[in-house]
Amino acid sequence: MSDTPLNPEALEVSPGFEHERLQGLIPSIVSEEELRAALEKAFEYRGDVTITCKDGRVIEGYVYDRRLAATLSESRVRVLPTDGSGRVSVSYGEIAALHFSGRDTAAGKSWEAWVRKYWEKKAAGESAAIEPERLE
């Protein structure tokens, strides 16, 4: 990192950070730490995940909550299944595999991408408004 302080008045765009591309990822969950880290990413992910349980159950859906505890059997992840069935709560200790199977709904929707699309529409003579795009 540079020793020169950033002057926000001189910057057109403040530096940001890269979001980790998780779509399609099947993380290694051999250890407790890997499982906890993968489920934390699943909670922050804006797409569906597929959880395979040790008993063979497969649950695909959106991870909307997790309850952390001292042990894996006491920690829980809560999922809204894609099949429309009721909410599901799964113990971390039951999880055999995790797959980031759904599309990240916010991928490519950074401020920079929005500004680029805005100016492309304006340059093409199309209507460009400062309104959010409809979610799919």
Image: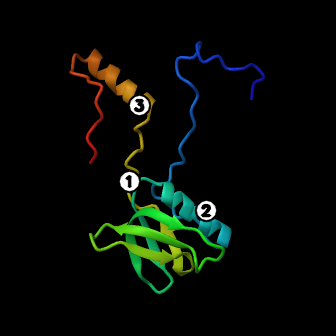
Q: Is label 3 in a helix, a strand or a loop?
A: helix
Camera-side residue: 3 or 96? 3
- Residue where numbered disc 2 is placed: 37
Q: Residue at x 57, y 79 (%)?
A: 93
Q: What number is the disc on residue 103?
A: 1
Q: Is label 2 in a helix, a strand or a loop?
A: helix
- Residue 24: give x, y in percent of width and height: 46, 58
Packing grade of label 2 (10 A; few <14, some 14-19, many >=20) is some
- Residue 111: give x, y in percent of width and height: 43, 31
- Of mark 2 and mark 1, the one earlier in the sequence is 2
Q: In this rendering, is residue 33 above or below 15?
A: below
Q: Is label 1 in a helix, a strand or a loop?
A: loop
Camera-side residue: 135 or 65? 65
- Residue 47: give x, y in percent of width and height: 40, 56
Q: Residue at x 61, y 62 (%)?
A: 37
- Residue found farthest to the right: 3
Camera-side residue: 7 or 34? 7
The kind of residue on which mark 3 rests is Ala
- Of mark 2 and mark 3, the one earlier in the sequence is 2
Mark 2–mark 3 Cα distance, whole angstroms, equals 29 Å
Camera-side residue: 79 or 69? 69
Q: In this rendering, is residue 22 above or below 112?
A: below
- Residue where numbered disc 3 is placed: 113
- Residue found farthest to the bottom: 55
- Residue 83: give x, y in percent of width and height: 28, 70
The kind of residue on which mark 1 rests is Arg
Mark 2–mark 1 Cα distance, whole angstroms, equals 20 Å
The kind of residue on which mark 2 rests is Ala
Q: In this rendering, is residue 96 above or below 61?
A: below
Q: Give left or right: position of 116 versus 127.
A: right
Mark 3–mark 1 Cα distance, whole angstroms, equals 17 Å
